[in-house]
Image (cartoon, rainbow, N blue to C red):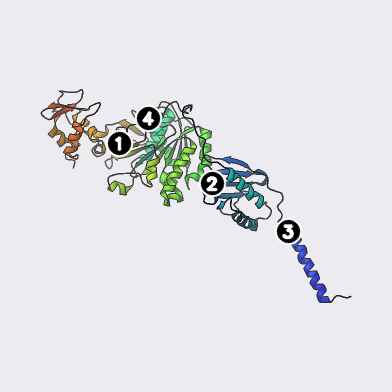
Amino acid sequence: MTTRPEAADELAKRAGIERKKARRATQDQPDEAMPPPQTEVDGLGRLTMAWPEHNLEVRASHISNVRGGIEARLAIRLNGRTPTAPFRLNVLSMSARDDIIRKLRAGRKDVDWTGLINHICQEVHEFDPDPKPVDLTSHQREADTQWLLEPFVRVLKPTLLYSEGGMGKSTFAMAIAISLATGEAILPGVKPLRSARTAILDWESDEDDTQEIMEAIADGANVVVPAGHIIYRRMSGTLPDHYEAIQKDVTDHGIELVVTDSIIAAGGEEGDRPATAARAYFDVMRALRVASLGITHLDKASERLRSGKPYGSVYYWNLARSVWRLRQEQEEGESEASIGLFHEKSNRGEKCKPLGWRVTFGETSISFGAEDVTAMPEVGKRASTPDQIVAVLRHGALHIQDIYAELPHIKETTIRQSLFRKTKTPRFVSLGNERWGLAGRVGEEPDKETDTRHAFFRGVG
């Protein structure tokens, strides 16, 4: 029986198609089955799975229980490249697994994506991000003292420093870093108990300007900053993106304080979601297990409402253990400025009294000198009412009407409440006939000729 030419051609064509399918099926098979991964968990609770023999790494983050499963955000790197954008996967959903496997196979067919996804799902399913409970009755504290630099930097705790722009926050933070590096009281009256190393994460300036400030403060204090005690990183993007590099710095250099300038800029794209950015900042600092000083700006809206809170989410205020506000006075063209530090929040113990310094700017130096914050015409008005009354009475007793005249910006009822308030350690004593003095200095009279102590208060509305 003979076959017609057309039929023979059809059979040959089909045979060719089958051979191509067979070759394609062979090519589509992965080189080898995917073995179990090497796993590692970082301080932010992110799970990294690595297959070094395949030059493959997968990071699972934002692992959370959801209705009907466990979700994770997955980022894959193969040969240093990302074959797909990061994606979320419900590891208990078979349909979700199959869908992502199909998408991955469309790009690379020489990888056992089924085995990879199965391993990922297994590791994420077994992952427990919760820290183990601690028995406080037998717990051994890590630090033998609670302070690195009292009252600003507490061991392992987050502090915020905020003010309007251009007030000198970065310069003040550098003074703290140099104090810790040298063990010297760069800020008179504030001396560290021991030396410590600082890392500066800077989103706003660069290493040249920061080094210039460091050298100027060191010159003004006549100290030498030891090598390796102040480490600088010029930053961009979001803080969590750099966690591994910062963690390496902390480990390699023995860092105990991390200064972030500024925490708003460190939020990067999360800045549009301030609560998320705030939580991310504190999560990173907690994971690094260091003390932190976050620099930020004043919220202008809250200042108009006279609350004067840091800019951004309320979480910055709530999650910080201590919050300081910096205020500055400087006449235009003057080489000296006065700064006052006001303790706005303390989660442990009483808030500190306002602290003040005089800052002198030389051609190549910056120096700090002690100054009474209540002696600053504008900054002094931010001190508490009792502190301002103490300043008025420091040189001798006065009639209450004279106290009113010295403090015209404070309501008379507020002054009276402060004078008459009963406390364990009274600061003021009544001398009769509405005259008041400081406790322990009864009977002293002001020097009429030389008393210029509070001219700055007169005429202040």
Which of the two marks, 4 or 1, is nearer to us in this view? 4
Report, in whole angstroms, how far the alpha carbon at label 2 lies from the one at label 4. 37 Å
Residue position for label 2: 61
* Residue shown at 64% from the left, 43% from the top: 37
Which of the two marks, 2 or 4, is nearer to us in this view? 2
Residue position for label 1: 340
Residue position for label 3: 25
User: Disc 1 residue type?
Assistant: Gly
Q: State which tag comes first along the sequence, 4 or 1.
A: 4
Residue position for label 4: 150
Q: State which tag comes first along the sequence, 2 or 3.
A: 3
Residue 283, x across and y down, in percent:
46, 41
Q: State which tag comes first along the sequence, 4 or 3.
A: 3
Badge 3 density bin: few <14, some 14–19, many ≥20, Cα 10 Å: few
User: Disc 2 residue type?
Assistant: Ser
Report, in whole angstroms, how far the alpha carbon at label 3 lies from the one at label 1. 75 Å
Q: State which tag comes first along the sequence, 2 or 1.
A: 2
Question: Mark 2 and 1 residues: CB-CB less than 8 Å, in contact?
Answer: no
Residue 153, x across and y down, in percent:
40, 33
359 or 341: which is nearer to us? 341
Image quadrant where residue 405 sits: top left
Mark carried by residue 188: none
Q: State which tag comes first along the sequence, 3 or 1.
A: 3
Report, in whole angstroms, how far the alpha carbon at label 4 lies from the one at label 1. 16 Å
Report, in whole angstroms, how far the alpha carbon at label 2 lies from the one at label 1. 42 Å
Instruction: Residue 453: tell me if it is visible.
Output: no
